[in-house]
Amino acid sequence: MAKVKTEYTCQNCGSHFSKWMGQCSRCGEWNTIVEEVIESSSKEKAWQTDSKSPSTGKSKVRAVKDFIPDRSERFSSADPELDRVLGGGIVEGSVTLVGGEPGIGKSTLLLQMALGISSKVLYVSGEESEQQVQMRARRIGIRNEECYLLTATSTQEIFQQIKSQDPDILIVDSIQTLHSQLIESAPGSVSQIRQCSSELIQFAKETGTPVFLIGHITKEGQIAGPKLLEHMVDTVLQFEGDRHHIYRLLRAHKNRFGSTHEIGIYEMHGEGMRAVANPSQLLLSERDADLSGNAVAATLEGIRPMLIEIQALCSTAVYGTPQRSTTGFDTRRLNMLLAVLEKRCGFRLATKDVFLNITGGIKVDDPAIDLAVVAAILSSNEDIALSPRTCFAAEVGLSGELRPVPRLEQRISEAEKLGFEEIVCSGHSKWSAKGVSIKVLEFNKVEDVFQHLFG
């Protein structure tokens, strides 16, 4: 009998070592290195019930020009927001990993897709019982009669059921609960996640069946398991949002079949996840025109323009050291903008606390909202309310200049559609004024914008 080979693997970063150590030399974490089996005596493919491969022919070398594109390689998921994030629909044979915090709505979204799509779906639940999944399914509403449920954690058992059911789509909730009999490690370990993912990816590629995997995340917000997992799959989707808000953002961090800048916006309700067709109108629905410190920015997520409200509060520092706090915005970016206002524009903000918030619980990293952030800070500092019919779209440079932003026409069109009367942008922007009824104000410096807003 062959000797079983083992190695020591860091459960945080997946690094391999020849002996046990208290601290991982790669990621610096303590007590994350465990001993795991790396070689098994069985060489049989896990997703097959016999030793024969379903592929009857050998792989051949073909010229790229000989490939004929198949227009039917994508099909709709019956969810317009999910289709948008995936790049136009589900691709046959693709493997999609969905991550997010506990309770954010990962299982609800995929179960809702399984119950709404007109395809045969096998939903594998390794965390919840049949009764729990059925309760959620009744709440969402069952529209797909060919949605089947399996509660199992062994990949060998799952593949046996797949062979008998022959589903069009496979959903696994979650990848951290699965275990393979080919290796002797605990479920959730790096070796088990790597082995189970490899078996599911091999099944998807050889049969053309789309596979959706739900993944847990660590306290740092990264998907649990080896980083190799994100490289192995085709698409990585991340659920974002604040538990105290009903809005959820589905963002593509990796997509081999589409753009990685697309987002889908949902509202969390008792009946499931409801797609938001016009997020700008919802995010601006509770505005008050008489309060200072509020400004509206025209941002862009992927190809979708969106207007968001930015709130700022400037007050005298009580404890000596000024505080800088943000929600939904990069704190380092805020410090840079405050330094620009202090150095280039002469505004004395070094002794004041500055708090910044993007309403709706969403996070934005678009540099085009810089001018709106500056306008909100100056409005709070001067205690003068801005016009509720004015929005902003420009990047602020280190010299206090206004820099142009991409796709300005789409931002202007979105602002015009929502009834705004003027939009402030950079004087160096290149855009077409054809058919635009909104007033476009162009400035080159932050000081000019201040003179226009506050006189």
Image: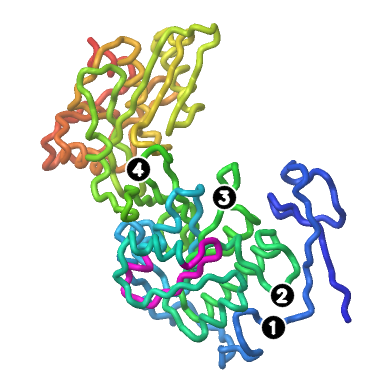
The vertical placement of 227 against 343, above or below, is below
How far from the left and from the top, in percent, is residue 70? 37, 78
Q: Mark 2 or mark 1, which is nearer to you?
A: 2
1 or 3: tag closer to the N-terminus:
1
Q: For residue 134, what is the image quadrant?
A: bottom left
Position of 430 compared to 174: left or right?
A: left
Q: Position of residue 160 (x, y in %)?
A: 56, 82
Q: Mark 3 falls on what kind of element?
A: loop
Query: SS at mark 2?
Result: loop
Q: Quadrant of residue 45?
A: bottom right
Residue 98 in view in this figure: yes
- Tell me, yes or no, whether the highlighted magenta stretch contains residue 127: yes
Indicate which disc residue 44 carries. Answer: 1
Q: Are marks 4 and 1 in contact (CB under 8 Å)?
A: no
Q: Which residue corresponds to the image point at 45% horizontal and 55% vertical from the top-left?
A: 106
Marks 1 and 3, how far apart in space?
A: 31 Å
Q: Secondary structure at mark 1?
A: loop
Give the numbered dot on residue 202: none
Amino acid type shown at disc 3: Ile
Give the residue furthest to the front. Answer: 131
Highlighted range, magenta = 113-130
Residue 71 visible here: no
Q: Earlier in the sequence, mark 4 or mark 1?
A: 1
Q: Which residue is mark 3?
A: 217
Residue pointed to by mark 4: 246
Nearer-N-terminus badge (3/4): 3
CA distance for labels 4 and 1: 47 Å
Distance between mark 2 and mark 4 Cα atoms: 42 Å
